[in-house]
Image: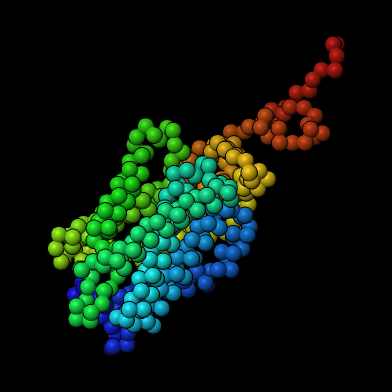
């Protein structure tokens, strides 16, 4: 059954059940983004935040590419040579964009104190795109030149997409699992004193999700690699989860809170303005909490609210010196404390 569901068609219509399973959640999420597009556009314009633009752009591209892949795969004959190549190319393309998003979000989180500028975000996206391109190219080459026999349909004489083969999938899943596990234990190591690690719980839940997913993929692909057929069921479940729920997870974890506030903050563009005027220079700004508790864009995504609560002044405790410093120099005639005015003496009596 776990192999049959990958290629069985609905009433001989060339529409595979597997494509429908992946299409429906992605299509629903795309409709959700379309309905909220105007609201999102206004929020993004109001914030002038490069990191929010990057996140929203990645989410939008991912879901559009996923829907296109499903629709095109339903319209071509995968059993034909050309149709098989088209199907493989579309799978590789979707994997490229998903992996780029996956790595970008993690890098943004680990280096968020230095990535509040347009150029730094572009560098991260370029680096993750190059890495994803190398990964996807290797996966596609293995898929075409050395297809895995576990995904061979002998009755129809064609291969379904096998993600580069079980050896490639097993190895890559192990590597990604180790990376995400290391990220999860960073807050309990001495490196937390040297790195500005995210404090928001949702970031670590996101990393935990990817760690568990890759561990499960490594188990399933490892079982298939050693000839255990039940491993294909594990692979199917993890594939379905990744290609249907990963993009909505990114949106919910890092964007839903921002789009849910009644008024977008306009205090996210300070570092971007510095970067715009010094495009060719390297600008390194320390990531510190503001005295007035103003959040940057990275803080809003990766920092929990409790971090900023500690910088708020208690309303029951007055701060006369600070309040006076906010007044115009012309308006200050003296120093007021407990409703008493202390004036400097004009001369000796």
How many numbered circles are shown?
Answer: 0
Would you identify the image quadrant in which residue 4 lies? bottom left
258 over 84 or under it: above or below = above
**What residue is shown at x 33% (from left), y 78% (from top)?**
81
Q: Residue furthest front?
A: 145
Image quarter of the N terminus: bottom left
Residue plotted at (14% across, 63% down):
227
- In the visual, does 216 lie left or right of 259? left
Q: Position of residue 87 (x, y in %)?
A: 36, 74
Judge whether residue 192 can be spotted in this image.
yes
Residue 24 seen in the current view: no
- The image shows residue 133 at horizontal and vertical percentages of 42, 58
Percent of width and height locating residue 334: 77, 27
Q: Quick check: 63 above or below 306?
A: below
Outermost top residue: 349
Foreground of the two, 42 or 195:
195
Task: Between residue 323 and residue 269, name the one nearer to us.
Answer: 269
Q: How is the image coloured?
A: rainbow
Q: Residue at x 36, y 51 (%)?
A: 207
> In the drawing, does residue 33 fall left or right of residue 17?
right
Q: Quadrant of residue 155?
A: bottom left
Query: In the image, residue 67 lies at what x, y percent?
Result: 43, 73
The residue depicted at 47 percent of the width and 73 percent of the height is 31
Quadrant of the rendering where the C terminus is positioned = top right
């Amino acid at each position: 059954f776990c192999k049959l569901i990958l290629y069985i068609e609905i009433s001989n219509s060339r529409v595979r059940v597997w494509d429908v399973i992946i299409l429906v959640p992605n299509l629903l999420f795309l409709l959700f983004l379309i309905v909220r597009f105007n609201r999102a556009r206004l929020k993004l314009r109001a914030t002038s935040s490069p990191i929010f633009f990057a996140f929203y752009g990645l989410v939008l591209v991912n879901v559009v590419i996923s829907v296109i892949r499903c629709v095109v795969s339903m319209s071509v004959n995968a059993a034909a040579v050309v149709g098989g190549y088209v199907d493989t190319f579309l799978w590789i393309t979707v994997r490229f964009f998903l992996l780029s998003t996956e790595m970008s979000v993690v890098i943004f989180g680990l280096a968020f104190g230095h990535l509040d500028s347009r150029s730094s975000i572009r560098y991260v996206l370029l680096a993750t795109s190059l890495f994803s391109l190398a990964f996807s190219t290797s996966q596609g080459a293995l898929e075409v030149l050395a297809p895995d026999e576990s995904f061979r349909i002998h009755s129809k004489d064609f291969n379904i997409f096998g993600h580069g083969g079980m050896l490639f999938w097993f190895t890559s899943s192990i590597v990604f699992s180790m990376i995400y596990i290391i990220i999860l234990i960073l807050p309990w190591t001495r490196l937390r004193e040297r790195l500005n690690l995210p404090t928001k719980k949702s970031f670590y839940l996101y990393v935990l999700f990817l760690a568990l997913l890759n561990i499960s993929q490594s188990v399933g692909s490892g079982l298939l690699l050693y000839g255990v057929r039940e491993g294909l069921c594990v692979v199917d479940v993890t594939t379905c989860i990744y290609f249907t729920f990963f993009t909505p997870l990114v949106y919910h974890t890092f964007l839903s809170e921002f789009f849910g506030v009644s008024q977008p903050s306009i205090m996210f563009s300070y570092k971007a303005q510095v970067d715009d005027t010094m495009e060719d220079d390297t600008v390194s700004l320390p990531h510190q909490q503001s005295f007035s508790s103003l959040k940057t864009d990275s803080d809003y995504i990766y920092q929990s609210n409790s971090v900023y609560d500690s910088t708020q002044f208690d309303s029951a405790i007055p701060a006369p010196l600070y309040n006076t410093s906010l007044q115009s120099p012309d308006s200050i005639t003296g120093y007021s404390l407990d409703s008493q005015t202390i004036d400097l003496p004009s001369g000796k009596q």
